[in-house]
Image: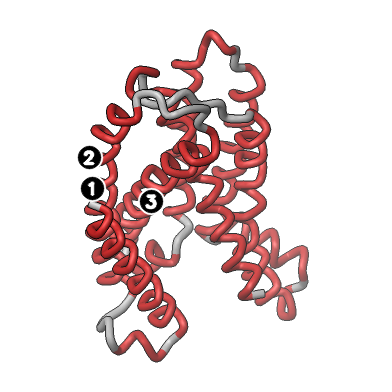
Amino acid sequence: MDILVITSQALLYLCFSVLVGSFVLLLVPSKYRPDIKVPKSILFISAITLPIFTFIPILDITLYIAPRLGLFESFKIVLTTYTVGTAWNFTLLGSVMLVLLMALARSHEKGIFSFLGILLTFGLILTVAWSSHAVSIGPIMGIISDFIHLAAVSIWAGILIIIGWCSLNHKNWLEFLSWFSIVDISCLVATVLSGVLLMDVLVDRYIDSWIVSYGQGLFIKHLFLLSLLFYAFIRR
């Protein structure tokens, strides 16, 4: 079950990145980016699978308490009394609204569609932050830091993913790099600062946390981040 939870979280972040990256780039005037064509099917799949991937932790909790209370009763309790269940209800509602928005949007309404789409997506990121483990330890700091962390990573990775997958040419490449460099650095700073706040909420001592799986995963993530930063500085 742990592997399923980890995989679902990775796919969840990919879906958020695709949605945020698409909406941000569609809001950017065409003279400041290459021409892009984002298949609507990718947006639909990302929006539809969000409540599926966020449901996996709920299933994990339900199966954990089911031997004592029964499957149906456990599922009802998790959905109605646990924070993760309440947050998932809003995630499901937001995903339905996002799918309806995509279905009803017309090509000439690209601006308002992208604006509403990014608002709904950030709202969905907020529901995921609300259901995070950090919130159970420090409600205010937990939800703020987790939201900023996930939003910054989604913007940063999402723009890169959509430009890499969906750009049709290299038009206005220098114009794109001029503003994306600022976004890139801003998202990196936001990711690092919010990550430090999350660590402060979740672990007492960074090195001591290496004895548990969460601390080990955190350490591996930081190694990857340092490698990415090193590569970025070399390329510059």
Quarter of the rendering occupied by the N terminus: bottom right
Nearer to us: label 3 or label 1: 1
Give yes or no for contact between labels 1 and 2 (Cβ–Cβ under 8 Å).
yes
Q: Residues within 10 Å of mark 1 (few under 14, many from 20)?
A: few
Q: Residue at x 33, y 62 (%)?
A: 228
Residue 82 visible from this viewpoint: yes
Residue assigned mark 3: 153
For numbered disc 3, what is the local secondary structure? helix
Label annotation for residue 185? 1
Q: Position of residue 100 (x, y in %)?
A: 64, 25
Which of the two residues, 50 or 21, is positioned nearer the viewer here?
Answer: 21
Q: Position of residue 140 (x, y in %)?
A: 29, 56
Q: By what rule are the colours in the image chosen?
A: secondary structure
For numbered disc 2, what is the local secondary structure? helix
Tell me the amino acid under the disc marked 2. Ile
Q: CA distance from mark 3 to mark 2?
A: 14 Å
Give yes or no for contact between labels 3 and 1 (Cβ–Cβ under 8 Å).
no
Q: Residue at x 42, y 29 (%)?
A: 170
Location of residue 217 by image quarter: bottom left
Q: CA distance from mark 1 to mark 2?
A: 5 Å
